[in-house]
Each structure stands twice: as C-alpha cells, then as structure tokens.
Image: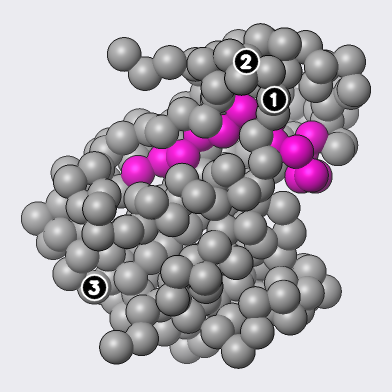
C-alpha cells in the first residue's frame, strides 16, 4: 500500500532534505510551497515519488484550493514552512506587521494545514512540526520568531491530546542554526554562527540532513508512543529535562 507524506516549504533547505528522506523511506511525497522553481528542483531530485503543489499555507483560500491536489489519505504531515522576520520595522505599524507575519508563517500556517488535512489522516498518521531552539534561547529569538516557535510547541502538546485517540502522534523537531538554509544565510553573520557553534557540545551546527533524520524517526513505527514532545537538535544548547 502506498504511503503518502506532505512536506510544506519543501522546495529547499530543511524541507527538501525532509522530502528526500521520506521518499527514501518509501513514501510518495507531496512537496508543497509558494515557489514553483524550487519545488520543481526538489521533485527532480526525488523522481517519480514526488509531486509539487503550489500553496500559501498562511492563506485559507490557498489551502482550500490546494486540497484537490493533495492525497485523499495522509500518513505524514511535516509542517516545515516558516521563517524569521526581516527585522526592518521603522515604526509601531511596522512592528505589528512583522509580528503578525511571523505568527502567520511560523504558527498559523501549520494550524491551517493540519486542520484542513485532519479528515484525511490515517489511523496511525504522524504530524511533525519544525520549530527552533529560538523558542527557548533568548539571544537567538529573532524578535517575534522565537515567541511564534514557542507557541508552536504549546500547540503541539495541545493537538497531541486532541487527536491522540485516533492513533495520530504530534511532535516538534526544534533545531539549532542549520547550515545551508536561507535563515542562516540571510540573518546570521559568520561571527554569530561561530558563536553558536562554540556553545554546542558537539562543536558543530545542524545540517538539513540532521533534521530530516529526526523527522524520519518520528514518522516511523518505532516512534508510535512518542507524542506531544519537542525534540531539540541543539547539541546541548537547549536540554529537555
């Protein structure tokens, strides 16, 4: 039987690595996002097991319009799309706009996708949200980005209890700075990255493949009793106790 996965923000970086990893694990993967070029590139890397779907997860109409293109049964949903704000607000109206945009991108989009697909989850489906240690690490919170990811963690726990009796698990993977991603390239200097690296126990940054491997584990049968959790990939910077 074909197993289906949907990965938002799957055109590049972490999303692409997750899509590739899930395809390697035997899933047919829908690579969803707003930019057709990167989506096509990811599908070309994966091959016949991948399908691109254009969608803006922050817009209810866009999510609804995309539903006919998405599988009728979904085994894995990875809410990966999201980004820190530009941080260029010049006045209070700009601050408000940045905070709302961050909440839409990093929280509301995941909520809308999950609610839209909820009737299609199989009896043992997996929902994996991509968070960030910015939710717990104040120096790297990027203004509204950290609070938005913190809200994602809270929603993860709430949803796990709402949907758990259906057999569905809900978890968040929260990495440290991840190499070869737009967030790192656009918002962190080489000096900041070196500082983050020095704080880790392993003395290295995350890679997209590190995140993908964690997602693949949570999507596997071995993780069926893990739900409502946040898995920090911070190399010791943030510890769950």
Side of 134 where 73 appears, left or right: left
Q: Nearer the viewer, mark 3 or mark 1?
A: 1
Question: Percent position (x, y) of residue 159?
Answer: 26, 46
Taking the spot 80% from the left edge, 21% from the top edge, the residue there is 193
Side of 22 where 176 appears, left or right: right
Mark number displayed over residue 108: none
Relative height, residue 31 to residue 155 (above, below): below
Taking the spot 38% from the left edge, 33% from the top edge, the residue there is 230
Taking the spot 81% from the left edge, 17% from the top edge, the residue there is 194
Can the viewer see residue 63?
no
Q: Reading the chain from its start, which is encountered first: label 2 or label 3? A: 3
Between 134 and 43, the residue placed more toward the observer is 43
Between 122 and 232, the residue placed more toward the observer is 232
Residue 174 lies in the magenta-colored region: yes
> Which region is colored magenta?
171-184
Q: Secondary structure at mark 3?
A: strand
Q: Reading the chain from its start, which is encountered first: label 3 or label 1? A: 3
**Residue of label 1:** 204
Between 166 and 109, the residue placed more toward the observer is 166
Question: Percent position (x, y) of residue 55?
Answer: 62, 71
Question: Percent position (x, y) of residue 165?
Answer: 9, 55
**Residue of label 2:** 200
**Residue of label 3:** 122
- Please tell me in which quadrant of the rendered image residue 187 appears: top right
Question: Percent position (x, y) of residue 123?
Answer: 17, 69
**3D distance between C-alphas at marks 1 and 2:** 7 Å
Q: Mark 1–mark 2 contact, CB under 8 Å?
A: yes
Q: Mark 3–mark 1 contact, CB under 8 Å?
A: no
Q: Secondary structure at mark 1?
A: loop
Q: Secondary structure at mark 2?
A: loop
């Amino acid at each position: 039987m074909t197993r289906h996965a949907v990965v938002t923000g799957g055109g590049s970086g972490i999303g692409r690595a997750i899509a590739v990893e899930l395809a390697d694990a035997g899933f047919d993967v829908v690579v969803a996002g707003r930019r057709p070029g990167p989506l096509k590139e990811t599908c070309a890397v994966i091959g016949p097991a991948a399908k691109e779907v254009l969608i803006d997860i922050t817009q209810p109409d866009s999510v609804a319009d995309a539903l006919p293109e998405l599988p009728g049964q979904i085994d894995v949903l990875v809410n990966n799309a999201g980004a820190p704000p530009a941080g260029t607000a010049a006045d209070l109206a700009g601050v408000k706009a940045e905070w709302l945009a961050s909440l839409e991108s990093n929280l509301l989009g995941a909520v809308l996708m999950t609610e839209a697909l909820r009737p299609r989850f199989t009896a043992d489906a997996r929902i994996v949200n991509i968070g960030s240690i910015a939710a717990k690490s104040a120096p790297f919170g990027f203004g509204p980005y950290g609070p938005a990811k913190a809200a994602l963690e809270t929603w993860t726990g709430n949803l796990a209890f709402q949907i758990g009796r259906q057999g569905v698990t809900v978890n968040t993977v929260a990495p440290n700075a991840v190499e070869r991603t737009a967030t790192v390239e656009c918002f962190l200097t080489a000096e900041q990255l070196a500082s983050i690296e020095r704080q880790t126990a392993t003395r290295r940054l995350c890679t997209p493949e590190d995140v993908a491997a964690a997602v693949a584990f949570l999507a596997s049968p071995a993780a069926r009793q893990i739900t409502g959790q946040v898995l920090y990939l911070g190399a010791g910077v943030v510890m769950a106790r």
